[in-house]
Image (tube, rainbow, N blue to C red):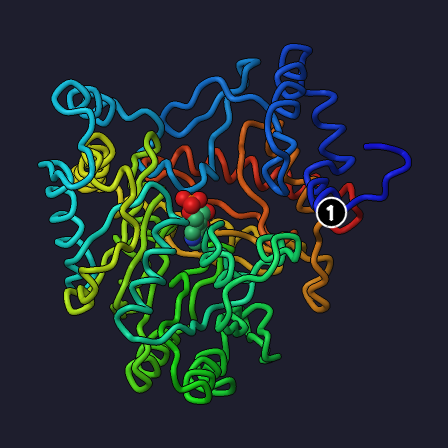
Amino acid sequence: MSDQAPQTPAQAEGEINTSPRRADWAARTHDQATQAMLDEDARLFLHQSVSTPCMSVIAKAEGAYVEDAQGRRYLDFHGNNVHHIGYGHPRLKAAIAKQMDELPFAPRRFTCEPASALAQKLSDISPGGLSKVLFTTGGSDAVEVALKLARAATGRHKTVSFWDAFHGAGFGASSVGGEQMFRSHLVGPLLSGTEHVAPFACYRCPYGYPEVNGAPQLDMCKTTCANFVRYVLEKEGDVAAVIAEPARAVPYIPPPGFWQAVREACDAHGTLLIFDEIPTGLGKTGEMFACNHDNVVPDILVMGKSLGGGILPLAAVLARPELDVAGAFAFGHYTHEKNPVTTRAGLTTIEIIEDEGLVENAATVGAHAIGRLCEMQQRLAVIGDVRGRGFLFGAELVMSRDGKEPADDLAEEVFYRCLDAGLSFKISMGNTLTFTPPLILTKDQMDTALDIVETALTESAQAAGLA
Ligand SMILES: Cc1ncc(COP(=O)(O)O)c(C=O)c1O
């Protein structure tokens, strides 16, 4: 950075990944070759907040592990939620190789057997018979298609979505997203008509209702967060769609009754409900789809990430058949709309998830993990909240239980101690240790990871005088 030039907001945002702790960790972790590759990366790629500068160099990804260029292995409790079946599953690699031999590509306007087979499979496993399908290359594109479809089907253009949500990087997705970083003034105006409301977030209820013993007091709050969605739908009167993650990846699980109330409000006001299951679909929360926990069926569901088996990029939009009303319009017409290799990967991934009982594994081992974190919470006052479902769970760190002051610094310290001990994960919202392991994880591997977390938490809290 030049001494003379003041930082632009983009430069300031781009330095999120350059904390002193990161620098310390890098200095004691990277050898010359790793540093040279990171320098090369910085030279070659456009810089952007969160993505750059890169943390390290990855050389291998296998099963539940990633390995850096210096041979250090990390249990990957992040994996961008693509690695449900583990990295490099042999059955998936074989299916992809076979498909590449048989039919490597299908130009647009041709159909092919793997694309149809995957569309049928998704329709079969979808909640409530969402039997019309469109494939895209990534989740952001799937969100764009869903938004266009909702507009076309309702003749309306407005949306309601959550502050703090992430739905992808396209203009539509950024507009319905609620994270400042993706809504930067630098890229100019976003879509109009995108209303935002506060999300469900019981530990820090935006409407000020307290939790008691870690549970929302629904008698008191009457799910105000859901009622506010209804209020906006009523006042606007012409909202095309509510779009949201049924379980927020932060993580936050909806309070009981939340989605039923929103579903009813949508029905009452002619508004479609779009669920973004891009990180949660295909079993992450211990059900095939996160919305299955709530028994609520959306009108449109978008999924992606793990659908490509952690190898190929693939996403999908599933819709109620009644929404197939705009055949003369092109929603996406994407080059890889019916790619036989990516769709074969999707089909085989789902077969692996079913044959290996991975959804059930996420439910049982996930419940065990959340139970262990709750036990840790009894011993460690810095754990303010434990929440999640299946293999989407986390622990929010605080300076004190009463004040709930976010312990961002502590979270970062815990993160690097865990990395040193061989566990990688993600910090959300500054102070929430967020764990999204692959669905193949065994109970033993989970215990190994949670032992690492407990040691790191205990030592970090002691070092910070918080124990
Ligand atoms: C909830 C949610 N929606 C949409 C997306 C965008 O998906 P992609 O990165 O494949 O474009 C993501 C990606 O992290 C996501 O978590």
The residue at 18%/38% (across/down) is 347
Residue extending farthest to the right is 4
Taking 50 as reference, is 232 left or right? left
Taking 373 as reference, is 16 left or right? right
Residue 205 higher or lower than 165, as above or below? below
* Residue 419 in picture, x, y percent from top left: 60, 30
Inspect the image, locate mark 1, and give the three-letter code of the amino acid beneath it: Asp
How would you rate the neighbour count of disc 1 (Cα within 10 Å): few for under 14, some for 14-19, many for 20 or more? Answer: some
Taking 401 as reference, is 91 left or right? left
Residue extending farthest to the top is 33
Instruction: State the residue in front, 330 or 142.
Output: 330
Residue 262 visible in the shown view: yes
* Residue 384 in picture, x, y percent from top left: 62, 60
Instruction: State the residue in front, 182 or 372.
Output: 182
* Residue 255 in picture, x, y percent from top left: 43, 72
For mark 1, give the secondary structure: helix
Residue extending farthest to the front is 328
Residue 369 visible in the shown view: no
Q: Which residue is mark 1?
A: 409
Number of callouts: 1
The residue at 50%/75% (across/down) is 216
Residue 237 higher or lower than 46, as above or below? below
The residue at 59%/74% (across/down) is 206
* Residue 84 in picture, x, y percent from top left: 33, 39
